[in-house]
Image (cartoon, grey):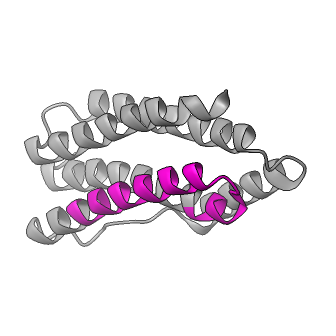
Amino acid sequence: MENNELLTEYMNAIYQNIKTAVQSIEDILPKVKDIKLQKELAEEEDKYLALEKECELFAKAEKIEGIKDNNWLEKAKLWSSINLSTMTDKTTRHIAELMLLGTFMGFITCVKDQADHNGVSKELDEILSNLKELERKNIDALMPFLI
């Protein structure tokens, strides 16, 4: 595969991971009653949006036109999953659990993307590293809501 294709693939993998997190927060935030959890999720969303912007700026600088959000089917599956799961249980604990599961999945995806794209781009490695660190911090921040 050509280097530009690898770069685009790597960038899109990171971008879609971030977009999934943002969509999850946007879908679940209206269901959250706990003010502290609302604040935590809003802060997380701001940090994901900053990383999203970094990806977009990187794509622009590298003249990558193939930047892709998740497809409509993935978005619909995520939205449906959140809405079905919170239909009968909107407790703070349950919402924190859902967000933790998604965050763990996002972290795992980061690890796999890093391994799959080793040596492709130092700049993207840094964005991915920042995303992994954000995921790690979010896990720590969400754990107390399970208690």
Could one spot residue 20 in this view of the protein?
Answer: no
Could one spot residue 9 in this view of the protein?
Answer: yes
Q: Quadrant of residue 5?
A: bottom left
> What secondary structure is the magenta-colored segment mainly?
helix
Magenta span includes 121: no
Residue drawn at x 72%, y 60% is: 31
Q: Is residue 122 left or right of residue 101?
A: left
Position of 47 relative to 114 (above/below): below
Q: Is residue 26 left or right of residue 126?
A: right
In the rendered view of the protein, which quadrant contains the C terminus? top right
Position of 105 relative to 34 (above/below): above
Nearer to me, 9 or 81: 81
Q: How many marks?
A: 0
Magenta span includes 40: yes
Residue drawn at x 71%, y 44% is: 92
The image shows residue 10 at horizontal and vertical percentages of 27, 47
Residue drawn at x 22%, y 48% is: 6
The image shows residue 64 at horizontal and vertical percentages of 20, 67
The image shows residue 122 at horizontal and vertical percentages of 9, 41
In the rendered view of the protein, which quadrant contains the N terminus? top left
Which stretch is magenta? 26-54
Nearer to me, 21 or 116: 21
Residue sitting at the far right? 88
